[in-house]
Amino acid sequence: MKRKPIKKIGVLTSGGDCPGLNAVIRGVVRAAAEREWEVLGFTDGYEGMITPVRYRRLDAAGIDDIMAMGGTILGTTNKGRFVAKVGEGNKAVIPRAILSEARETFEGLGLDALVCIGGDGSLSTALQLQEAGIPVVGVPKTIDNDLNATAMTFGFDSAVAVVVDALDRLHTTARSHKRLMVVEVMGRHAGWIALHGGLGGGADAILIPEIPYRMDKLVQFVKNRTQDGFGSTMVVVAEGAKEQGKKLATKEAKLRDAGEVRLGGIGEQLAVALEAATGQEARSVSLGHLQRGGTPSALDRILATRFGVGAVRLIEQRRFGQMVSYLRYHVGGVPIAKAVGTLRTVDPGCETVAAARSVGICFGDD
């Protein structure tokens, strides 16, 4: 039986936004145009596929200037009927009726494939759509850089650049006032942003989820720096970092609509505790969504474009149920099932952590 040729594909962005999403969309649309395929973009993530169905036609001319834009022209959400997380690291089963309605929309629009751009939770939903009969190709998206089966995701480099720029600015005021500065960055389960941003920005201490810290060790580290003549100390802490034997710092006790507890506050808590223990004036800064917004870096624009083109290539090869991946400097594809479910976290014994320790950076564990 002769295969039906690919003529029309859909694309959507789901979960949190990050720099580079528009570059992926542009890569998908331009690569599809080269093959004379039509592209429909669903708005507001997977929600656009069910009543009321929301989509727009995308052509090469209309998306020509979006590469440098932050966010996503299609909109996104981590709420609603396709919520894929129900707690820390747990996945939800999307109701069969919702999956069936999405499939009806897909078939009713005459689509041949769907490109789903998202993180661990969003790609778990994509896998369920694939199992429900929708030919899906995934594109990994997370500024936390914590997805398995790919060495890097777009948005991470831009987020790290924000952290480094913030540290450059905070160093000057910390030194001027001889203050202890605590900078809270994103990183729920993985400390990649804190590790790379702290190392690149000249942090004195870096606290990450993978290495629980001891307050007494951190306090002694700060005191030793003061005795050695250092007037200020810069501490970078991931939002998911926690003290040994303690719970995560959260802003709310209950789950949000997205099914996750909202983390935050560890930076302020640390600043208060360190000032009390050391006697040195301390300030805290939470970079929050500054890390998600703004213009993507050159590296992220290039990687995102390659991912968009790679997604179209996977569709052309009919490798559905796969996710674009970047391994050994090559953009290829891996099964979505191998990429979700287990996060790629920082190995406490990795070379980057070892290099940070070698230049005197404290992780609060020794």
Image (tube, grey):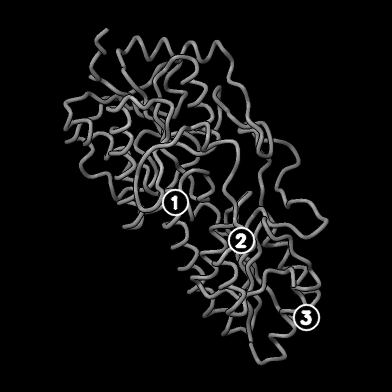
Which quadrant of the view contains residue 354? bottom right
Residue corresponding to mark 3: 279
Question: Disc 2 residue type?
Answer: Glu
Q: Residue at label 1?
A: 152
In the rendering, at what x and y percent does residue 167 appear? Answer: 52, 71
Q: Which amino acid does label 1 sit on?
A: Met
Please give left or right for residue 34 compared with residue 249 in the image: left
* Quadrant placement of the C terminus: bottom right
Q: Earlier in the sequence, mark 3 or mark 1?
A: 1
Within 10 Å of disc 3 (Cα), the crowding (few <14, some 14-19, many 20+) is few
Circle 2 — which element? strand
Are the two marked residues, 3 and 1, in contact with CB atoms closer than 8 angstroms?
no
Q: Which amino acid does label 3 sit on?
A: Gly
Whole-percent x, y for residue 62 in the image: 20, 35
31 horizontally vs 94: left or right: left
The residue at which mark 2 appears reads as: 184
Q: In which quarter of the image is the N terminus?
A: top left
Is 11 rendered above or below residue 214? Answer: above
Instruction: Check contact, mark 1 vs mark 2: CB within 8 A.
Output: no
Cα distance, mark 1 to mark 2? Answer: 22 Å
Looking at the image, which residue is at 34% across and 9% down?
108
- In front of the other: label 2 or label 3? 2
